[in-house]
Image: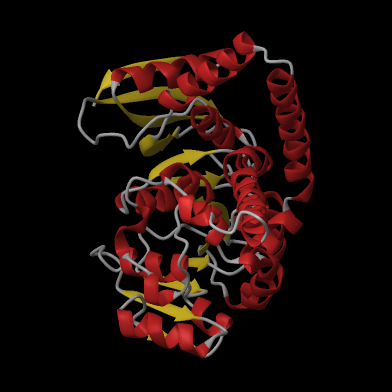
Amino acid sequence: MQWRDATDEGASVPPTARKVAIVGTGLIGASLGLALGRLAEVEEIVGYDRDPGQLAEAARRGAITRPAVSAADAAAGADLVVLAVPVSAVPAVAAEIGPALRPGAILTDVASVKARVVEALQAAAPGGVHVIGGHPMAGSAETGAAHAFADLFVGATYLLTPTTHTEPEAYRLVHGLVTRLGARVLAVSPQRHDLLVAVTSHLPQLAATTLMNLAAERARGEHAGLLLLAAGGFRDATRVAASNPELWLDICAENRDAIVAVLDDYRERIGALRSVLAVADEEGLRRALSDARAARRALPGKESLSGRLLELQLSIPDRPGVFAEVTTTVGLAGVNIEDIGVEHAPEGGRGLLRLAILGPENAAKARVALEAIGYEVLEHER
């Protein structure tokens, strides 16, 4: 099976990531370095940051094995290159390192906006370099390498965004590394990713910002003791308001359209709730509170790593985008793929894709989702 651009011919994916480059050694980049450094096959982690202090701190903490003098110097000869820079900096940094990337290398990122970022990565990557967008849903109100820790990704959701150009072997390598960091990997398209995180990440940030500013303004006026009364619920709801403003300026600029659409929807719902309260509609209020309570209780928690591992097998045609179609379909069903295998048919034209899924319930969800888009799926004990 081909599943790659003609320009990629001969650019084989490395069997493992022996040399990793991390450009941007803040909280996420340095935490990735610490986590990847625990893996036996990772022999070298080269880091670069435009802030010499952050780079020195990452080296002192052991997040990198060698500091580089530039982003291109870090990327040269690396099997895996991770851009952990602000969203707005990705295009320029990707263009800078592009000529230094070796054929077969994998280029990924950790930005919380994907459509424009993946486009920039693909535009900068020379032929034979594999691009896979990434977004770890992990972080802290604290910033910088000084606050990095290797377990930051344990139990977190880590989104990967394959496209029609994604090589299965490259995806499998990144997926395997992320899984071994303890994260739960889900695949979505770059465009779908931006719509989803506008609801689950970007709106909560702006809602917390608004609530915190409202409370602070009231506390400066006639209710001077207001913040002394802040209980656990208020603190939980406003925790992310302590995040780095510069980070969120970038995110809001890059994902503006999706965020504005979600804010419009949120405004309508707040208006409807206000109307319910204004007319003392007790049943309407009870319904809103009960629906939210049920939805909150249904949120998935951290999954146990115990249970039966099942394998789904499906025959895959040789056409552009099929791998991304399969992985994103399973991801949108809310199912984590524990492992992936691809068998290429000697005669060409088709291949066999093997997906390892934890637990019969998750396997059933994935199977139903794949069958709904026309695939024949066989299930086996692994």
Nearer to the camera, 245 or 307: 245
In the picture provided, is 171 more to the left or to the right than 128?
Answer: left
Image quarter hosting the C terminus: top left
Vertical placement of 66 versus 5: above or below?
A: below
Q: Choose top left, top right, bottom left or bottom right for residue 119.
A: bottom right
In the picture provided, is 144 more to the left or to the right than 205?
Answer: left
Colouring: secondary structure
View extreme (top): residue: 283
The answer, for residue 226, to whether it is visible in the render is yes
The answer, for residue 79, to whether it is visible in the render is no
**Residue at image coords 27%, 64%:** 41
In the picture provided, is 63 more to the left or to the right than 78?
Answer: left
Vertical placement of 13 versus 22: above or below?
A: above
- Where residue 101 appears, as percent x and y from the top left, is 56, 72
Vertical placement of 380 versus 211: above or below?
A: above
Nearer to the camera, 329 or 84: 84
- Where residue 14 appears, as percent x and y from the top left, is 41, 60
- Where residue 309 appears, as percent x and y from the top left, is 25, 28
